[in-house]
Image (cartoon, helix red, strand yellow):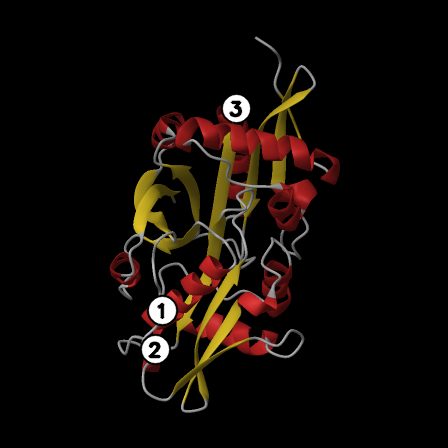
Amino acid sequence: MPETVLRAPTLDDVDAVVEVINRASRAQRGRDEVDANAVQGWWTQPAPFDLARDAVVAVEDGEIVGYGDLGDQANDGAVLWLDVRGGAIEEIHAELERRALERRAADGVVRAVAAEQDADLAALLEARGYRRIRSSYRMGIDLRDRTFAPVWPEGTVVRASAEGVDEPLLYRISQESFADHWGHTTTPYEEWLHWLRSMGVGDPSLWFVAEVDGVPAGVAICRPHDHGDSDCGWVSVLGVLREYRRAGLGTALLAHAFAELQRRGRLRAELGVDAESTTGAVGLYERAGMQVQWRWDIWERG
């Protein structure tokens, strides 16, 4: 057996890590998951993430065979996230877990994500004392041979965002509309802005704002394609403020986004959602014609 060496990645490793993640994704789900833009965007995010401290690659015979990273979005040790991909999962997970436990607050928890098809990682997590606590779905819709006609609540006007003007508004509505979602942590503005402008999201003509009687009430922030899949558009954020829910605004915003992605030649549209969302998001997406593509499970240990 070749020796496994763990080290911190550098930006020169982007392409190799993309291949590691996509090789695993192709084996489990038959398609790529990321591209270089996604990985580089993740690695260059603002503090508290630190590439040298919070990510590792596994190297065997000079080749990168596995990747993992550690996240502490609130930077307080309350919830630390582990994400491990590719080969050498035992070595990578053990190292990241060691670092997470060192940083964990007294009442903090460590969480890990595993695709439903990744039986090896699920077995490893269970053996190390994790329990599955929740899941999220990737949902999708075929845009071909469909007509999308949004039905807007009375008094609603929708518009594309103005770059350099609307970012604070998009941020406020995004954060407020998800404040009651499970596990929500407020993202600092500069970090959120990094995600908006990088990771392939940066097309303000696909950042939609819905106003009701002149008051901003909801947003749909999309990117023109999913990472590594030019035929698939991605809905990054669909958010409606609490006081404007249950009136059809979210459904209309989603249909508006689908219609625009379809007009741009996309064959499919996809998004991610908490499988147990208390806002009824899964049902909304199903009524809009979306179906579950696959599931990610969240595992936790104290």
Tell me which amino acid carries mark 2.
Arg
Q: Residues within 10 Å of mark 1 (few under 14, many from 20)?
A: few
Question: Closer to the N terminus: mark 1 or mark 3?
Answer: 3
Quadrant that contains the N terminus: top right
Residue named by callout 1: 180
Structural crowding at the residue carrying mark 3, measured as other residues with C-alpha within 10 Å and reported as few (<14), some (14–19) or many (≥20): many
Q: Earlier in the sequence, mark 2 or mark 1?
A: 1
In the displayed structure, would residue 163 be above or below residue 114? below
Task: Name which residue type carries label 3.
Answer: Gly
The percent position of residue 98, horizontal first and vertical second, equals: 53, 36
Q: Which residue matches tag 2?
A: 242
Query: Which residue occupies the foreground of this view, 56 or 171?
Result: 171
Q: CA distance from mark 1 to mark 3?
A: 36 Å
Query: Which residue is tagged 3?
Result: 87
The numbered disc on residue 132 is none
Mark 2 vs mark 1, foreground winner is: 2
The span from disc 2 to disc 1 (Cα, nearest Å) is 9 Å
Of all residues, the one furthest to the top in this rendering is 1
Asked whether disc 2 touches disc 3, contact meaning CB atoms under 8 Å apart, the reply is no
Cα distance between the residues tagged 2 and 3: 43 Å
Q: Amino acid at mark 1?
A: Asp
Which element carries disc 2, helix, strand or loop?
A: helix
How many marks the image carries: the answer is 3
